[in-house]
């Protein structure tokens, strides 16, 4: 099964194509310029995500579900980008699942409050990477795709200790 993992955003949207069992095919970011009209930025996200979908033909999508407690303006704009992402997936008939950051962290490390460093460490181990010099948005997209793959598996990973 081929999964597209998506870390939603309107300035930077991370994406990753992952084949199960656990092989990264491609990853990157869709970036939009802050000075562009917001509607243009949303159109860029739609067009670029469509190109990725057509090129890699994922069977399903895993999207990080966002939670904002502070900045409502940012939350509304990210929600608009999320709407464009979900519409684009629907137009390409790709089913999607959403995972909270806590679900992703718990699935990958066994601890829902794992640090970014712990997540990066697990991504390196899971995908047998020599380095994890990736943008946080790309790491998040890989993480959510890995979470989706692992949610249906019966094996368990070696978890990072919850105590710190």
Image (cartoon, grey):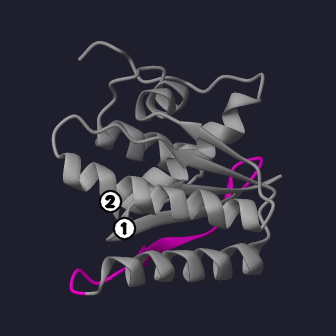
Distance from disc 2 to disc 1, alpha carbons, whole Å, reads 7 Å
Whether residue 26 is in magenta: the answer is: yes
Q: Which residues are magenta?
A: 19-35
Q: Is residue 154 left or right of residue 114?
A: right
State whether residue 157 is above or below residue 46: above
Q: Which comes before the other along the chain, label 2 or label 1?
A: 1
Q: Which mark is residue 129?
A: none
State whether residue 4 is above or below residue 162: below
Kindly indicate whether the residue at mark 1 contacts the one at mark 2 (C-beta within 8 angstroms): yes
**Residue 73 pos. (x, y %):** 21, 54
Say what secondary structure mark 1 lies in: loop
Q: Which mark is residue 77?
A: 2
Toward the top, the furthest residue is 163
Of badges 2 and 1, nearer the viewer stands 2
Front residue of 155/39: it is 39
Q: Which residue is mark 1?
A: 10
Q: Does the image show residue 131?
A: no
């Amino acid at each position: 099964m081929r999964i597209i993992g998506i870390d939603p955003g309107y300035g930077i949207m991370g994406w990753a194509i992952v084949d199960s069992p656990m092989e990264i095919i491609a990853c990157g970011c869709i970036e939009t310029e802050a000075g562009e009209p917001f509607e243009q930025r949303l159109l860029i996200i739609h067009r670029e995500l469509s190109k990725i979908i057509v090129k890699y033909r994922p069977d399903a999508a895993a999207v990080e579900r966002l939670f904002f407690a502070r900045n409502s303006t940012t939350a509304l704009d990210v929600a608009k980008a999320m709407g464009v992402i979900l519409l684009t997936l629907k137009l390409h008939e790709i089913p999607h699942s959403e995972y909270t950051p806590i679900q992703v962290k718990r699935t990958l490390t066994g601890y829902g409050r794992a640090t970014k460093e712990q997540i990066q460490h697990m991504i390196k181990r899971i995908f047998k990477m020599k380095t994890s010099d990736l943008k946080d948005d790309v790491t998040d997209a890989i993480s959510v795709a890995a979470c989706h793959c692992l949610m249906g598996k019966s094996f368990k990973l070696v978890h990072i200790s919850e105590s710190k």
